[in-house]
Image: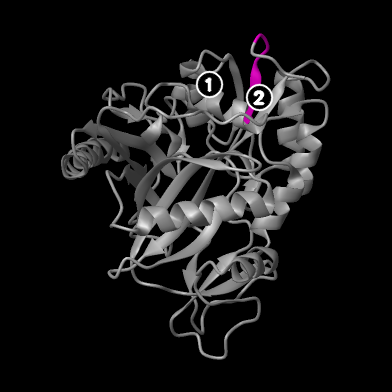
Protein backbone atom coordinates (compact mmCIF):
# COMPACT_ATOMS: atom_id res chain seq x y z
CA UNK A 1 0.00 0.00 0.00
CA UNK A 2 1.38 3.40 -1.01
CA UNK A 3 1.47 6.37 1.34
CA UNK A 4 2.78 9.85 0.62
CA UNK A 5 5.96 9.16 2.55
CA UNK A 6 6.99 7.27 -0.60
CA UNK A 7 7.24 8.72 -4.10
CA UNK A 8 4.64 7.91 -6.73
CA UNK A 9 5.62 6.72 -10.20
CA UNK A 10 3.96 8.77 -12.97
CA UNK A 11 3.92 7.38 -16.51
CA UNK A 12 2.62 9.17 -19.59
CA UNK A 13 3.57 10.18 -23.11
CA UNK A 14 4.37 13.51 -21.45
CA UNK A 15 4.63 13.17 -17.66
CA UNK A 16 5.47 16.79 -16.84
CA UNK A 17 1.91 17.90 -15.98
CA UNK A 18 1.42 14.94 -13.62
CA UNK A 19 4.84 15.35 -12.00
CA UNK A 20 4.24 19.06 -11.43
CA UNK A 21 0.72 18.40 -10.10
CA UNK A 22 2.18 15.91 -7.63
CA UNK A 23 4.77 18.46 -6.52
CA UNK A 24 2.08 21.13 -6.00
CA UNK A 25 0.25 18.63 -3.80
CA UNK A 26 3.39 17.95 -1.75
CA UNK A 27 3.94 14.46 -3.19
CA UNK A 28 7.29 13.33 -4.58
CA UNK A 29 7.10 11.89 -8.10
CA UNK A 30 9.37 9.78 -10.27
CA UNK A 31 8.51 10.19 -13.93
CA UNK A 32 8.82 8.15 -17.13
CA UNK A 33 7.79 9.56 -20.52
CA UNK A 34 9.00 10.16 -24.08
CA UNK A 35 10.77 13.46 -23.46
CA UNK A 36 12.28 13.87 -19.98
CA UNK A 37 12.29 17.61 -20.63
CA UNK A 38 13.74 20.30 -18.37
CA UNK A 39 10.46 20.93 -16.53
CA UNK A 40 9.91 17.23 -15.83
CA UNK A 41 13.41 16.95 -14.43
CA UNK A 42 12.79 19.98 -12.21
CA UNK A 43 9.45 18.71 -10.89
CA UNK A 44 10.30 15.04 -10.43
CA UNK A 45 12.54 13.49 -7.83
CA UNK A 46 13.93 11.29 -10.62
CA UNK A 47 12.97 10.85 -14.26
CA UNK A 48 13.77 8.96 -17.44
CA UNK A 49 12.85 8.98 -21.11
CA UNK A 50 11.90 5.87 -23.08
CA UNK A 51 11.46 5.55 -26.85
CA UNK A 52 8.11 5.52 -28.60
CA UNK A 53 6.59 2.42 -30.10
CA UNK A 54 3.45 2.63 -32.18
CA UNK A 55 0.79 4.63 -30.37
CA UNK A 56 2.63 4.89 -27.07
CA UNK A 57 5.72 3.95 -25.09
CA UNK A 58 8.06 1.07 -25.85
CA UNK A 59 6.76 -1.62 -23.45
CA UNK A 60 10.04 -3.26 -22.45
CA UNK A 61 11.89 0.03 -22.13
CA UNK A 62 9.04 1.41 -20.03
CA UNK A 63 9.01 -1.58 -17.68
CA UNK A 64 12.79 -1.43 -17.29
CA UNK A 65 12.76 2.31 -16.55
CA UNK A 66 9.91 1.87 -14.06
CA UNK A 67 11.85 -0.86 -12.26
CA UNK A 68 14.94 1.37 -12.01
CA UNK A 69 13.06 4.39 -10.69
CA UNK A 70 10.36 2.70 -8.59
CA UNK A 71 11.11 -0.99 -7.99
CA UNK A 72 8.09 -3.26 -7.65
CA UNK A 73 7.26 -4.37 -4.12
CA UNK A 74 8.86 -1.33 -2.47
CA UNK A 75 5.71 0.64 -1.60
CA UNK A 76 5.50 2.88 -4.68
CA UNK A 77 2.24 4.15 -6.10
CA UNK A 78 1.48 4.38 -9.83
CA UNK A 79 -0.45 7.10 -11.66
CA UNK A 80 -0.72 6.89 -15.44
CA UNK A 81 -1.65 9.41 -18.11
CA UNK A 82 -1.81 9.02 -21.89
CA UNK A 83 0.02 6.36 -23.87
CA UNK A 84 -1.43 3.18 -22.37
CA UNK A 85 -4.92 3.37 -23.87
CA UNK A 86 -4.17 0.76 -26.53
CA UNK A 87 -2.48 -1.76 -24.23
CA UNK A 88 -4.28 -2.59 -20.97
CA UNK A 89 -2.02 -5.64 -20.64
CA UNK A 90 1.00 -3.34 -20.34
CA UNK A 91 -0.75 -1.39 -17.59
CA UNK A 92 -1.32 -4.68 -15.75
CA UNK A 93 2.40 -5.49 -15.93
CA UNK A 94 3.34 -1.98 -14.88
CA UNK A 95 1.01 -2.07 -11.87
CA UNK A 96 2.42 -5.36 -10.55
CA UNK A 97 4.04 -4.67 -7.16
CA UNK A 98 2.83 -1.04 -7.10
CA UNK A 99 -0.47 0.41 -5.88
CA UNK A 100 -2.41 1.46 -8.97
CA UNK A 101 -3.85 4.89 -8.20
CA UNK A 102 -6.19 4.99 -11.16
CA UNK A 103 -8.56 2.85 -13.14
CA UNK A 104 -7.56 -0.81 -13.55
CA UNK A 105 -6.80 -2.50 -16.89
CA UNK A 106 -10.32 -3.93 -17.26
CA UNK A 107 -11.84 -0.43 -17.09
CA UNK A 108 -9.30 0.91 -19.58
CA UNK A 109 -10.16 -1.98 -21.90
CA UNK A 110 -13.91 -1.41 -21.57
CA UNK A 111 -13.90 2.30 -22.39
CA UNK A 112 -11.23 2.26 -25.14
CA UNK A 113 -12.73 -0.66 -27.07
CA UNK A 114 -15.14 1.07 -29.49
CA UNK A 115 -17.44 -1.95 -29.72
CA UNK A 116 -17.88 -1.99 -25.95
CA UNK A 117 -17.89 1.74 -25.29
CA UNK A 118 -20.35 2.87 -27.95
CA UNK A 119 -22.64 -0.05 -27.16
CA UNK A 120 -22.62 1.19 -23.57
CA UNK A 121 -23.51 4.72 -24.70
CA UNK A 122 -26.38 3.32 -26.74
CA UNK A 123 -27.73 1.35 -23.76
CA UNK A 124 -27.53 4.44 -21.54
CA UNK A 125 -29.21 6.65 -24.15
CA UNK A 126 -26.16 8.93 -24.42
CA UNK A 127 -25.81 10.62 -27.84
CA UNK A 128 -22.69 9.97 -29.92
CA UNK A 129 -21.74 10.25 -33.62
CA UNK A 130 -22.61 7.31 -35.82
CA UNK A 131 -19.77 4.83 -35.31
CA UNK A 132 -18.87 1.67 -37.22
CA UNK A 133 -16.22 -1.02 -37.05
CA UNK A 134 -16.50 -1.75 -40.79
CA UNK A 135 -15.47 0.74 -43.48
CA UNK A 136 -18.49 2.70 -44.80
CA UNK A 137 -19.40 2.22 -48.45
CA UNK A 138 -19.02 5.98 -49.04
CA UNK A 139 -16.12 7.81 -47.43
CA UNK A 140 -17.59 11.32 -47.50
CA UNK A 141 -18.25 12.73 -44.04
CA UNK A 142 -16.45 9.95 -42.19
CA UNK A 143 -13.36 9.90 -39.99
CA UNK A 144 -11.05 6.96 -39.38
CA UNK A 145 -9.58 6.65 -35.87
CA UNK A 146 -7.10 4.25 -34.33
CA UNK A 147 -8.36 2.24 -31.36
CA UNK A 148 -6.68 3.55 -28.20
CA UNK A 149 -5.20 6.53 -30.01
CA UNK A 150 -4.52 9.78 -28.18
CA UNK A 151 -3.50 13.31 -29.10
CA UNK A 152 -5.52 13.51 -32.32
CA UNK A 153 -2.64 12.58 -34.63
CA UNK A 154 -4.31 9.24 -35.35
CA UNK A 155 -7.54 10.84 -36.67
CA UNK A 156 -7.98 11.39 -40.41
CA UNK A 157 -10.74 12.09 -42.88
CA UNK A 158 -11.64 8.88 -44.66
CA UNK A 159 -11.15 8.98 -48.41
CA UNK A 160 -10.17 6.65 -51.19
CA UNK A 161 -6.47 7.20 -50.42
CA UNK A 162 -6.68 6.22 -46.77
CA UNK A 163 -5.83 2.60 -46.03
CA UNK A 164 -7.39 1.66 -42.74
CA UNK A 165 -5.49 -0.41 -40.20
CA UNK A 166 -6.82 -3.47 -38.43
CA UNK A 167 -6.97 -1.51 -35.17
CA UNK A 168 -9.24 1.29 -36.36
CA UNK A 169 -12.87 2.33 -36.40
CA UNK A 170 -14.99 4.82 -38.31
CA UNK A 171 -17.01 7.75 -37.03
CA UNK A 172 -19.18 10.46 -38.58
CA UNK A 173 -17.56 13.87 -38.55
CA UNK A 174 -19.72 16.38 -36.68
CA UNK A 175 -19.37 20.15 -36.83
CA UNK A 176 -19.28 21.97 -33.51
CA UNK A 177 -17.09 23.01 -30.61
CA UNK A 178 -14.68 20.37 -29.30
CA UNK A 179 -15.15 20.41 -25.53
CA UNK A 180 -14.07 18.33 -22.57
CA UNK A 181 -15.22 17.85 -18.99
CA UNK A 182 -12.75 16.88 -16.29
CA UNK A 183 -14.23 15.07 -13.30
CA UNK A 184 -13.35 13.16 -10.14
CA UNK A 185 -15.01 9.81 -9.47
CA UNK A 186 -15.02 7.34 -6.58
CA UNK A 187 -16.55 4.37 -8.42
CA UNK A 188 -20.12 5.39 -7.58
CA UNK A 189 -20.46 9.16 -8.00
CA UNK A 190 -18.59 12.09 -9.53
CA UNK A 191 -17.70 15.73 -8.94
CA UNK A 192 -17.26 17.99 -11.96
CA UNK A 193 -13.86 19.71 -11.83
CA UNK A 194 -14.28 21.94 -14.89
CA UNK A 195 -14.93 22.31 -18.60
CA UNK A 196 -12.53 23.29 -21.36
CA UNK A 197 -12.53 23.94 -25.08
CA UNK A 198 -9.92 22.31 -27.30
CA UNK A 199 -8.58 23.12 -30.74
CA UNK A 200 -6.46 21.50 -33.41
CA UNK A 201 -2.88 22.45 -34.25
CA UNK A 202 -1.75 23.48 -37.72
CA UNK A 203 1.37 21.73 -39.01
CA UNK A 204 1.68 22.61 -42.68
CA UNK A 205 4.01 19.79 -43.70
CA UNK A 206 1.84 16.98 -42.31
CA UNK A 207 -1.68 15.62 -42.86
CA UNK A 208 -2.47 15.64 -39.14
CA UNK A 209 -5.51 17.91 -39.27
CA UNK A 210 -6.81 16.80 -35.86
CA UNK A 211 -3.56 17.06 -33.90
CA UNK A 212 -4.24 18.31 -30.37
CA UNK A 213 -3.36 22.00 -30.26
CA UNK A 214 -4.26 23.07 -26.73
CA UNK A 215 -7.18 24.08 -24.54
CA UNK A 216 -8.69 26.90 -22.52
CA UNK A 217 -10.88 26.61 -19.44
CA UNK A 218 -14.52 27.59 -19.95
CA UNK A 219 -16.29 29.98 -17.63
CA UNK A 220 -19.63 28.32 -18.35
CA UNK A 221 -21.55 26.11 -20.76
CA UNK A 222 -24.76 27.08 -22.55
CA UNK A 223 -27.84 26.90 -20.29
CA UNK A 224 -28.91 23.31 -19.69
CA UNK A 225 -25.81 21.72 -21.18
CA UNK A 226 -23.92 21.52 -17.88
CA UNK A 227 -26.80 19.70 -16.16
CA UNK A 228 -27.14 17.24 -19.04
CA UNK A 229 -23.39 16.56 -19.11
CA UNK A 230 -23.29 16.00 -15.38
CA UNK A 231 -26.03 13.38 -15.72
CA UNK A 232 -24.01 11.67 -18.45
CA UNK A 233 -20.88 11.66 -16.29
CA UNK A 234 -22.76 10.22 -13.31
CA UNK A 235 -24.29 7.50 -15.49
CA UNK A 236 -20.89 6.49 -16.90
CA UNK A 237 -19.25 6.44 -13.47
CA UNK A 238 -21.94 4.12 -12.13
CA UNK A 239 -21.94 1.89 -15.22
CA UNK A 240 -18.16 1.47 -15.45
CA UNK A 241 -17.01 2.09 -11.86
CA UNK A 242 -14.67 4.94 -12.82
CA UNK A 243 -12.25 6.24 -10.21
CA UNK A 244 -9.96 9.25 -9.91
CA UNK A 245 -9.52 12.04 -12.44
CA UNK A 246 -11.07 11.25 -15.84
CA UNK A 247 -12.19 13.33 -18.78
CA UNK A 248 -14.97 13.05 -21.33
CA UNK A 249 -14.58 14.60 -24.79
CA UNK A 250 -17.66 15.75 -26.70
CA UNK A 251 -18.84 17.97 -29.54
CA UNK A 252 -21.34 20.75 -28.79
CA UNK A 253 -23.31 22.10 -31.76
CA UNK A 254 -24.89 25.53 -32.27
CA UNK A 255 -28.18 24.33 -30.77
CA UNK A 256 -26.50 23.29 -27.51
CA UNK A 257 -26.77 19.56 -28.31
CA UNK A 258 -23.77 17.38 -27.48
CA UNK A 259 -22.38 14.08 -28.79
CA UNK A 260 -19.81 12.12 -26.79
CA UNK A 261 -16.59 11.26 -28.64
CA UNK A 262 -14.50 9.41 -26.08
CA UNK A 263 -13.85 8.78 -22.42
CA UNK A 264 -10.32 8.89 -21.02
CA UNK A 265 -10.25 7.04 -17.69
CA UNK A 266 -7.09 8.79 -16.47
CA UNK A 267 -5.89 12.32 -15.68
CA UNK A 268 -5.58 14.57 -18.73
CA UNK A 269 -3.34 17.57 -19.39
CA UNK A 270 -6.34 19.83 -18.72
CA UNK A 271 -5.95 19.20 -14.98
CA UNK A 272 -3.58 22.21 -14.98
CA UNK A 273 -6.41 24.45 -16.15
CA UNK A 274 -8.45 23.63 -13.05
CA UNK A 275 -5.92 22.98 -10.28
CA UNK A 276 -6.97 25.99 -8.24
CA UNK A 277 -5.86 24.81 -4.83
CA UNK A 278 -2.78 22.94 -6.03
CA UNK A 279 -4.27 19.72 -4.71
CA UNK A 280 -5.94 17.94 -7.64
CA UNK A 281 -3.28 15.24 -7.65
CA UNK A 282 -4.04 14.43 -4.01
CA UNK A 283 -7.78 14.61 -4.76
CA UNK A 284 -7.16 12.05 -7.52
CA UNK A 285 -5.51 9.67 -5.04
CA UNK A 286 -8.31 10.13 -2.50
CA UNK A 287 -11.01 9.55 -5.14
CA UNK A 288 -9.28 6.36 -6.30
CA UNK A 289 -9.58 5.19 -2.69
CA UNK A 290 -13.27 6.01 -2.56
CA UNK A 291 -13.32 9.54 -1.10
CA UNK A 292 -14.76 12.49 -3.04
CA UNK A 293 -14.26 16.08 -1.82
CA UNK A 294 -17.34 17.99 -0.71
CA UNK A 295 -16.29 20.89 -2.93
CA UNK A 296 -13.45 21.96 -5.20
CA UNK A 297 -11.67 25.29 -5.40
CA UNK A 298 -11.30 26.76 -8.89
CA UNK A 299 -8.43 29.01 -10.00
CA UNK A 300 -8.98 32.75 -9.60
CA UNK A 301 -8.44 33.34 -13.34
CA UNK A 302 -9.00 31.53 -16.62
CA UNK A 303 -6.11 29.40 -17.84
CA UNK A 304 -5.19 28.14 -21.28
CA UNK A 305 -2.29 26.66 -23.18
CA UNK A 306 -1.14 25.98 -26.74
CA UNK A 307 1.02 23.03 -27.75
CA UNK A 308 3.68 24.35 -30.12
CA UNK A 309 4.76 21.89 -32.84
CA UNK A 310 7.79 22.07 -35.11
CA UNK A 311 6.90 23.16 -38.63
CA UNK A 312 10.22 21.77 -39.84
CA UNK A 313 13.16 19.91 -38.25
CA UNK A 314 15.10 21.88 -35.64
CA UNK A 315 17.57 21.49 -32.81
CA UNK A 316 17.26 23.38 -29.52
CA UNK A 317 20.32 25.62 -29.12
CA UNK A 318 22.31 25.86 -25.92
CA UNK A 319 21.55 29.57 -25.73
CA UNK A 320 17.76 29.15 -25.98
CA UNK A 321 16.00 31.47 -23.54
CA UNK A 322 12.58 30.33 -22.39
CA UNK A 323 10.00 32.85 -21.15
CA UNK A 324 8.37 32.10 -17.80
CA UNK A 325 5.10 31.30 -19.61
CA UNK A 326 6.63 28.30 -21.42
CA UNK A 327 6.33 24.75 -20.05
CA UNK A 328 7.64 21.39 -21.30
CA UNK A 329 10.96 23.01 -22.23
CA UNK A 330 13.21 20.63 -24.17
CA UNK A 331 16.81 20.47 -23.01
CA UNK A 332 19.55 22.03 -25.11
CA UNK A 333 20.62 19.91 -28.06
CA UNK A 334 17.28 18.12 -28.42
CA UNK A 335 16.49 17.31 -32.06
CA UNK A 336 12.80 17.79 -32.92
CA UNK A 337 11.25 16.53 -36.14
CA UNK A 338 8.46 18.08 -38.19
CA UNK A 339 5.11 17.70 -36.44
CA UNK A 340 6.65 16.83 -33.08
CA UNK A 341 5.89 18.94 -29.99
CA UNK A 342 8.41 21.59 -29.01
CA UNK A 343 6.90 23.06 -25.85
CA UNK A 344 3.69 24.40 -24.31
CA UNK A 345 2.74 28.08 -24.24
CA UNK A 346 0.65 29.04 -21.18
CA UNK A 347 -1.48 32.03 -20.17
CA UNK A 348 -3.86 33.10 -17.41
CA UNK A 349 -6.20 36.09 -17.37
CA UNK A 350 -9.57 37.18 -15.93
CA UNK A 351 -11.48 35.98 -19.01
CA UNK A 352 -11.16 33.51 -21.85
CA UNK A 353 -10.94 36.08 -24.64
CA UNK A 354 -7.89 37.69 -23.04
CA UNK A 355 -6.29 34.27 -22.51
CA UNK A 356 -6.68 33.47 -26.21
CA UNK A 357 -5.15 36.80 -27.24
CA UNK A 358 -2.21 36.23 -24.92
CA UNK A 359 -1.68 32.71 -26.26
CA UNK A 360 -1.71 33.92 -29.88
CA UNK A 361 0.78 36.72 -29.17
CA UNK A 362 3.10 34.46 -27.18
CA UNK A 363 2.94 31.72 -29.79
CA UNK A 364 3.91 34.19 -32.55
CA UNK A 365 6.80 35.49 -30.46
CA UNK A 366 8.16 32.04 -29.82
CA UNK A 367 7.74 30.93 -33.43
CA UNK A 368 9.78 33.96 -34.53
CA UNK A 369 12.49 32.98 -32.07
CA UNK A 370 12.46 29.43 -33.40
CA UNK A 371 13.25 30.62 -36.95
CA UNK A 372 16.70 31.58 -35.60
CA UNK A 373 17.11 28.09 -34.15
CA UNK A 374 16.61 26.58 -37.60
CA UNK A 375 19.33 28.78 -39.08
CA UNK A 376 21.81 27.76 -36.39
CA UNK A 377 20.76 24.09 -36.10
Q: Which residue is most to the bottom?
A: 137
**Image quadrant in which the C terminus is located:** top left
Precedes in sequence: disc 1 or disc 2 = 2
Residue 173 in sight from this viewpoint: yes
Measuring from the top left, give residue 198's x and y in whole percent: 36, 52
Query: What x and y, as percent, mark residue 321?
Result: 28, 23
Compared across the picture, whether 59 is left or right of 159 comes to: right
Per the rendered image, the range of residues in magenta is: 5-10
Q: Which residue is mark 1?
A: 22
* Residue 192 sits inside the magenta stretch: no
Residue 124 lies, in percent from the top left, at 60, 66
Residue 59 placement: quadrant: top right
Tag shown at residue 9: 2
Of residues 12 and 340, the one nearer the viewer is: 12
Q: Is residue 200 visible?
A: no
Left or right side of 228 for 6: right
Q: CA distance from mark 1 to mark 2?
A: 10 Å
Q: Residue at x 75, y 26 (%)?
A: 99
Confirm whether the magenta stretch covers residue 9.
yes
Q: Is residue 72 left or right of residue 309?
A: right
Q: Residue furthest top?
A: 5
**Which residue occupies the foreground of this view, 283 or 145?**
283
SS assignment at label 1: helix
Amino acid sequence: MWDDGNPVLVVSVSARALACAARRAGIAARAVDLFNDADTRACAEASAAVPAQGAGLDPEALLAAAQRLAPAGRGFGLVYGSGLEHCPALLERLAWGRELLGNPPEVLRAVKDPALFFSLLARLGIPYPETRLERPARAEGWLVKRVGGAGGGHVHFLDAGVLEREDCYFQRHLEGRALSVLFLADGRAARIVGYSEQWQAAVAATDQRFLYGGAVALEELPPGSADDLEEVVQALVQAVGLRGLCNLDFVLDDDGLFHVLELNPRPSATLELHDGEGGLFRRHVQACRGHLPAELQSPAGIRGYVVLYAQRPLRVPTAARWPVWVADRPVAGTAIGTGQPVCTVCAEAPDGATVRRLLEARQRRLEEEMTLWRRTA
